[in-house]
Image (spheres, helix red, strand yellow):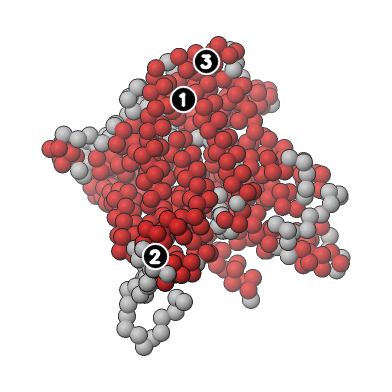
């Protein structure tokens, strides 16, 4: 940052700043403002009415449940993947790293579709599931699987560049001093990456709670049972309950704003402890 | 560190005194296989139940072609618009100081953080004929909501952060002295931007635009509300996948999904090649 010398605002600068800010306001701020404006269109009472519904609360609970299962799993995966990729030299490492990023280049709809292809009524594993009496599609299990697939890369891609940059010197020193595997992990590695881990978990969680496309494909939209908050918003909107849809949407918009706030705080406060090569 | 001397016996893995390789590598590969590889294998294999002719037919029916065209053309246009405006935003954020800059910088990431369904209904309200922007545009005879233009607007929203975030770090590292040298040699601001800044930025710009494009092609939540979803006109490819699936046409849905994936990879491959060529020319 300090290497950049900033020009004083002069010449064409005010015009450029003006155009850029106007664009950001039009593309980003306007939709955000619209969510709150529409939610309070019929005053506070209309807004609160949306939360009188038991379906809304079961959607909140389900969203929290799905995130509570998928985020920790992807965090553990991120730690394991980052450890084996940055601490050892082995063949196929580049391929492994590419595969971890793969879910980001796949449409969310496809991330849902693949589970239907495996576990749907005409899926590969349908006979097996029938024999066991288990259902995956149109159940919470399906929602969790789709969410895990969509959010898989978030933690790993924060940790890999950081741990690469930090190198293994401290862990090697710990080995020399006789530390066991758990001691190395909990007293050397974890403290070194904790803020990046939190950062990745934060982004992973935001996406897990807000995911729509993948979840929509596997959910079946069963009210009170397989409806997450984003799906609840869709149902209300399609039933022309616009105030209800936007009121529910303010919860998700609030989540997004809190996520951005914590993310920015982490970036300002712990810039050195987050990987320099962060992309988003 | 990565170089392997030729005389040594071939090894799959270099020895290390650090514990935990077997456990972490095994877990990583197992998890990745269960969550990503086996499911995606289903996507690649299942369409062929229709036979090669059937796959071709499913992916090139007039309706599928129209949907794929819309997703790719609107996605490409959105990526180009985001490349231009994203470069401008990054430039303003890196080069100038103004009040509230940190908040503005944080807001750039809002499209990443805001759930797509929320963005979708908000954009629809804004651009619907009775919305704040839509009503003005309707007076001018422009319809946005429920047309392909609406799809473009939604894709511009979701793609906005990609270019800014890939260009920003490069701009921060760009040496001011080269620009100052250009200035002392009499280059106009426009010449400096075109001959000094742009060539340095081009690889990052292309990769950012490529990411925005890949995201736009698969985007679903923010688009379906504003698109109106008329077959052959404003129906995007991901929606067609969902529609096929609702009719229990698994193989047909997978065929369109596979076509989307193949086309995206092809275009990203071309962009990567382009980037490599530019990088090589820059070094020469």
Q: The residue marked by circle 3 belongs to what chain?
A: A
Identify the residue at horizontal 41%, vertical 31% (top origin).
Answer: A63
Q: Considering only order in the chain, which callout, 2 or 1, is on the residue closer to the N terminus?
A: 2
Pointer 1 chain: A
Residue highlighted by disc 2: A179
Contact (CB < 8 A) between labels 1 and 3?
no
Residue, disc 3: A48
The CA distance from mark 2 to mark 3 is 56 Å
Labels 1 and 2 within one chain: yes
Q: Is residue A92 left or right of residue B215?
A: left
Q: Position of residue B32 (x, y in %)?
A: 33, 54
- Tell whether label 2 touches label 1 (CB within 8 Å): no
In the image as oriented, which residue stretches furthest toward the left? A131
Q: In the image shown, does B86 or A248 lie closer to the viewer?
A: A248
Query: At 33% from the left edge and 41% from the top edge, which residue is drawn?
Result: A145
How far from the left and from the top, in percent, is residue A254?
A: 55, 30
Label 1, on which residue? A233
């Amino acid at each position: 940052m300090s290497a950049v010398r900033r020009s004083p605002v002069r010449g064409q600068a005010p015009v450029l700043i003006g155009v850029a800010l106007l664009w950001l306001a039009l593309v980003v701020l306007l939709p955000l403002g619209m969510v709150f404006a529409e939610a309070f269109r019929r005053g506070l009472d209309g807004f609160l009415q949306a939360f009188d519904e038991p379906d809304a609360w079961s959607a909140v609970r389900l969203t929290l449940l799905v995130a509570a299962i998928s985020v920790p799993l992807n965090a553990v995966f991120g730690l394991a993947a980052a450890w084996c990729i940055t601490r050892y030299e082995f063949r196929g490492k580049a391929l492994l790293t590419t595969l971890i990023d793969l879910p980001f280049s796949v449409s969310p709809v496809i991330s849902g579709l693949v589970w239907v292809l495996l576990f749907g009524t005409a899926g590969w594993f349908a006979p097996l599931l029938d024999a066991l009496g288990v259902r995956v599609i149109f159940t919470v299990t399906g929602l969790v699987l789709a969410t895990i697939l969509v959010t898989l890369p978030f933690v790993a891609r924060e940790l890999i560049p950081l741990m690469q940059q930090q190198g293994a010197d401290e862990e090697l020193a710990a080995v020399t001093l006789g530390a066991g595997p758990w001691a190395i992990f909990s007293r050397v590695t974890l403290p070194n990456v904790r803020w990046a881990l939190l950062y990745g978990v934060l982004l992973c969680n935001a996406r897990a709670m807000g995911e729509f496309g993948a979840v929509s494909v596997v959910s079946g939209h069963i009210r009170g049972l397989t409806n997450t908050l984003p799906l609840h918003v869709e149902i209300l909107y399609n039933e022309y309950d616009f105030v209800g849809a936007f009121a529910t949407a303010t919860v998700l918009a609030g989540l997004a704003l809190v996520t951005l706030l914590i993310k920015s705080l982490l970036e300002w406060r712990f810039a050195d402890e987050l990987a320099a090569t962060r992309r988003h | 560190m990565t170089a392997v001397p030729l005389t040594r016996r071939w090894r799959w893995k270099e020895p290390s005194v650090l514990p935990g390789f077997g456990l972490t590598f095994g877990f990583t590969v197992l998890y990745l296989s269960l969550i990503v590889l086996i499911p995606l294998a289903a996507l690649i294999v299942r369409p062929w139940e229709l036979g090669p002719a059937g796959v071709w037919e499913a992916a090139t029916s007039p309706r599928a072609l129209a949907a794929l065209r819309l997703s790719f053309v609107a996605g490409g246009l959105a990526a180009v618009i985001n490349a231009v405006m994203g470069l401008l935003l990054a430039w303003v954020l890196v080069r100038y100081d103004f009040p509230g800059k940190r908040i503005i910088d944080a807001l750039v990431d809002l499209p990443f953080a805001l759930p797509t369904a929320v963005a979708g209904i908000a954009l629809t309200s804004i651009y619907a004929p009775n919305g704040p922007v839509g009503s003005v545009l309707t007076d001018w005879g422009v319809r946005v909501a429920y047309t392909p233009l609406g799809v473009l607007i939604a894709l511009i929203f979701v793609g906005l952060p990609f270019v800014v975030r890939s260009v920003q770090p490069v701009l921060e590292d760009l040496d001011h002295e080269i620009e100052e040298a250009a200035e002392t040699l009499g280059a106009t601001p426009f010449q400096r931007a075109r001959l000094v800044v742009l060539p340095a930025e081009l690889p990052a710009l292309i990769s950012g635009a490529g990411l925005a494009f890949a995201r736009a092609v698969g985007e679903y939540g923010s688009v379906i509300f504003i698109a109106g979803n008329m077959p052959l006109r404003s129906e995007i490819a991901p929606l067609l996948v969902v529609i096929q699936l609702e009719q229990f046409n698994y193989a047909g849905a997978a065929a369109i999904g596979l076509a989307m994936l193949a086309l995206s990879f092809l275009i990203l491959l071309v962009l990567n090649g382009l980037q490599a060529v530019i990088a090589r020319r820059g070094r020469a």
